[in-house]
Image (cartoon, grey):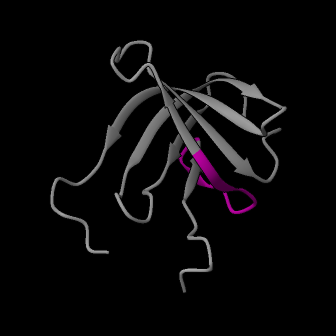
Amino acid sequence: DLDQAADVPLAHDGEPVDHANVERIDLTNVHHPQECRAQVRLQGSISDFHEGDSVTVGPTPLSKLQIDGTVDGQDDTTNAIILSIDGMEAPTETPTH
């Protein structure tokens, strides 16, 4: 059903997070890998996420993008966690959608 938003999995320190869903992912400084950050906006509480925690976002429904990162901060106004990106993967084959 295209009217229903797809769930994007989220793991915190290796454990699936059931009480939050990824609403949006924004990437900054993509041309500078050492400075690249992901702002991950969540539906649900961000209070359990702390600087230095390990987070895995994805895979996303269409592109199958998965981001591994370390919490670098929080943005309480947008309910987002800021990740320093440790790795990003997406399959190279054409997605089936």
Q: Is residue 35 left or right of residue 20?
A: left
**Height in image: 29 above or below 13?**
above
Furthest-front residue in view? Answer: 3
Tell me where residue 79 appears, x and y as whole percent.
Answer: 78, 40
Tell me where residue 49 appears, x and y as whole percent.
Answer: 73, 35
Image quarter in which the C terminus is found:
bottom left
70 or 29, nearer to the observer: 29
> Which residue lies at the image location 79% right of the left edge and 53% below the top edge?
44
**Height in image: 32 above or below 26?**
above
**19 falls in the magenta region:** yes
> Which residue lies at the image location 54% right of the left edge and 59% below the top edge?
9
**56 falls in the magenta region:** no
Furthest-left residue in view? Answer: 93
Image quadrant in which you'd find residue 16: bottom right
Q: Is residue 57 left or right of residue 78?
A: left
- Highlighted magenta segment, given as a residue range: 13-24
Image quarter in which the N terminus is found:
bottom right
**How many numbered marks appear?**
0
Q: Is residue 14 left or right of residue 96?
A: right
Tell me where residue 84 appears, x and y as whole percent.
Answer: 51, 23
Image quadrant in which you'd find residue 46: top right
> Which residue lies at the image location 40% right of the left edge and 27% below the top edge?
86
Tell me where residue 71 appears, x and y as whole percent.
Answer: 61, 27
